[in-house]
């Protein structure tokens, strides 16, 4: 958008002229979840889990926003979809590089046969989730631990 400003003399002739450019951009907010790593019993090189092992999933939510005002996310969720042989053990919102855009509820809701997939979903609420005013980006680090067990 361009605005022109003119300073006129008492006779109406232009004494000075100025062009003002305004660049407007639509508000945007994005959240991407990336897999960082996975390890079994604390060892990233192990690929086969045994009965009773703990599998840790390390995921990284990455944020980007360009907003004219602070925005609160309503009813934000993080869903982990896992095989039936995995049982949720614990969750950690790791402090390293944390932006803490939300408060992680570490007690998920369990949904068996999520949407007919035959898998179990663990649904974590993302409370107090707010994107700041202006242009911003950041990351958080989340750990999810699951135990392997025999489903009878």
Image (cartoon, rainbow, N blue to C red):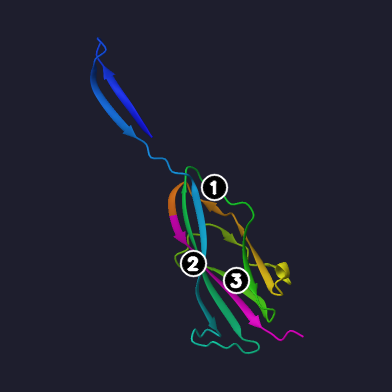
Q: Which SS class for mark 2?
A: loop
109, 103: nearer the viewer: 109
Q: Which residue is mark 2?
A: 95
Identity of the residue drawn at 66% across and 69% down: 122
Q: Is residue 18 above or below residue 10?
A: below
Q: To which quarter of the image does residue 114 belong?
A: bottom right
63, 117: nearer the viewer: 117
Q: How many marks?
A: 3
Identity of the residue drawn at 53% across and 79% down: 38
Q: Which residue is mark 3?
A: 91
Compute the Cα span from label 1 to label 3.
Answer: 26 Å
Q: Is residue 55 above or below residue 34?
A: below
Q: Is residue 26 magenta?
A: no
Identity of the residue drawn at 54% across and 47% down: 71
**Residue 73 coordinates in the image, percent (x, y):** 58, 52
Compute the Cα span from label 1 to label 2.
Answer: 23 Å
Identity of the residue drawn at 49% across and 66% down: 95
What stretch of residues is rendered in magenta?
137-152
Dot placed on the residue nearer the N-terminal end, 1 or 2 = 1
Q: Which mark is residue 71?
A: 1
Judged by depth in the image, the label closer to the viewer, 1 or 3, is 1
């Amino acid at each position: 958008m361009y605005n022109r400003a003119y300073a006129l003399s008492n006779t109406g002739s232009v004494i000075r002229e100025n062009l003002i450019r305004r660049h407007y951009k639509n508000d945007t907010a994005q959240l991407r979840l990336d897999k960082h790593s996975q390890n079994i019993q604390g060892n990233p090189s192990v690929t086969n889990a045994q009965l009773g092992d703990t599998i840790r999933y390390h995921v990284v939510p990455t944020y980007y926003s360009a907003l004219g005002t602070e925005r609160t996310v309503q009813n934000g969720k993080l869903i982990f979809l896992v095989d039936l042989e995995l049982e949720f053990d614990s969750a950690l919102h790791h402090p390293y590089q944390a932006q803490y855009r939300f408060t992680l509820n570490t007690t998920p809701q369990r949904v068996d046969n999520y949407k007919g997939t035959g898998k179990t979903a663990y649904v974590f609420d993302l409370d107090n989730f707010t994107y700041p005013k202006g242009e911003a980006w950041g990351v958080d680090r989340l750990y999810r631990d699951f135990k392997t067990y025999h489903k009878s």
